[in-house]
Amino acid sequence: MAESAGERRLVAGVDSSTQSCKVTIRDAGTGAVVREGRATHPDGTSVDPRHWWDALSTAIADAGGFDDVTAVAIAGQQHGMVALDADGRVVRDALLWNDVRSADAAAQMVEELGREAWVARTGLVPVASFTGTKLRWLRDAEPENAARVAAVALPHDWLSWRLRGYGPADESPLGPDLDALATDGSDASGTGYWDPVRREYDPELFEAALGKPMRPAQTGDDDAVVVPRVVAPDEAMGTLDVDVPLVGGGVARAGLVVGPGLGDNAGAALGLGLGPGDVAVSLGTSGTVFGVTDTEVTDPSGTVAGFADGTGSRLPIVTTLNAARVLEVIGGLLGVDHGELGELALQAPAGADGLVLVPYFVGERTPNRPDATASLVGMTPATTDRAHLARAAVEGMLCALADGLAAVEDTGVTVERLLLIGGAARNEAVRAVAAQVFSRDVSIPEPGEYVAAGAARQAAWVLDGRLPSWEVSATVVPADPHPEVLEQYRAHATR
């Protein structure tokens, strides 16, 4: 833990991810980390949001509390459907981004409107991950629950609402004021019913999803379903008027400024300080390729989603369901951890002598194959050993993301600097193979919680009225082109 904050003004950033909640408390001026905390989330693709609130409370306590913190912003996993009733209670467990039960609903919605129309109105083509398709699933599969829905939020919206003192009357000081719900453009842009160009909700698309009319919070007083008010990137959601009790005995004090928050990938972009020409490849359990651009992004194929970023620009993004999970699966099979798997991988040559792993272990989002399974091809007596399998795992993970990078470039985004982040990016074999598969220099920022850092940077922006510049140091792995690795992967992945 860093030294005492003294008289420095402190801001906090939260990353409420699929697996855990991380809190970073930083100096508002320099971005220096003062202290940090974390807590775990339960496994699964369907989760009671109460666990997120418990984990946030625990992570805040683990970080030493918020008594000396002036502003906070929460970043969270995108797309998760948090449906609330009129009393502010969660209607059912939230369906997370990686829950694919709404795949059929997504296909129906695409057929009804057409890909080009979806891209023109929302910047994306529906897949199972997006909130709108989950609402369609709820309408069709659980009509009784759908009938109870009075508001729809996303994970970071709901957590921010709870932190500001709202929620069920017996759990919160301010009660179930659904009109207090607020969000930001980056998270709203992943719902499938918000237009990142006009920066407005599309009521017709929402009603097509849930079968009920909608209204943004603080607009009108009818019985339409409430969706969060979208605030500007440098605008506060609000300031705590009362002390808000946290689970376990902690308190968020009155006077704490709460920023708009943002989606996790937009948070990472802000934490890394990405600008035009920068593209990041993130290797978490899932994988993402995203960049920042000032121009409109359209991809009728649906491969690249034209989300908003956390500053008012665009965040073209490709997401895969299988990234570090590939290393976990193959490492578990071989009985080794990530480091040992990397050592094995470096014992085999580039291309693994023709052994190819197509890593669709939990289906895939990009390409949109929710029911796909993984496959291993090219097995011979010479390639069926531990080293070749480890090499094929690392290459398969990175080749899938290289296809994502190519798709982002095809939309007109220029890649001048490629950054590799996430837990798996710390593996030496992953770094070396990335320089081969991507055939370009790969910049590796120092390890850090960049989603939480981006949220903290946003909190400082809201506090001071200007976006601070926080330095991010990185090392560069020189390009070591091996185009044959990607070529042989594509030969099997497209079958």
Image (cartoon, rainbow, N blue to C red):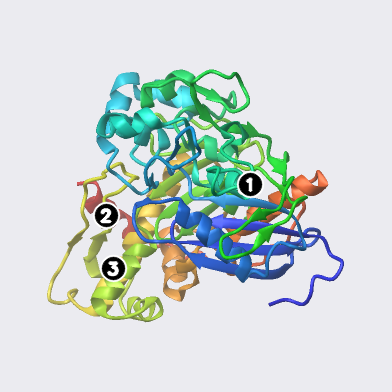
Decide which of 225, 110 is in the foreground and name it. Answer: 225
Q: Amino acid at mark 2?
A: Tyr
**Can residue 370 be seen here?**
yes
Q: CA distance from mark 1 to mark 2?
A: 46 Å
Decide which of 242, 32 is in the foreground and name it. Answer: 242
Instruction: Quickly name the residue at label 3.
Output: 329
Residue at horizontal 56%, vertical 38%? 176
**Could you tell me residue 97's position as x and y percent?**
39, 46
Up the image or down, 23 lies above or below 238; here it is below
Q: Nearer the viewer, mark 1 or mark 3?
A: 1
Up the image or down, 155 lies above or below 230; here it is below
Q: CA distance from mark 2 to mark 3?
A: 11 Å
Residue at horizontal 42%, vertical 31%? 149
**The quarter of the displayed image where residue 379 is located:** bottom left
Q: Which mark is residue 360?
A: 2
Q: Which mark is residue 173?
A: 1
Mark 2 element type: loop
Q: Quadrant of the N terminus?
A: bottom right
Total tally of numbered discs in the picture: 3
**Can residue 126 be seen here?**
no
Q: Earlier in the sequence, mark 1 or mark 2?
A: 1
Residue at horizontal 77%, vertical 77%? 3
**Could you tell me residue 410's position as x and y percent?**
45, 38
Q: Mark 2–mark 3 contact, CB under 8 Å?
A: no
Q: Farthest residue in the left direction?
A: 381
Q: CA distance from mark 1 to mark 3?
A: 45 Å
86 on left or right of 175:
left
Decide which of 225, 236 is in the foreground and name it. Answer: 225
Mark 1 element type: loop
Q: Earlier in the sequence, mark 2 or mark 3?
A: 3
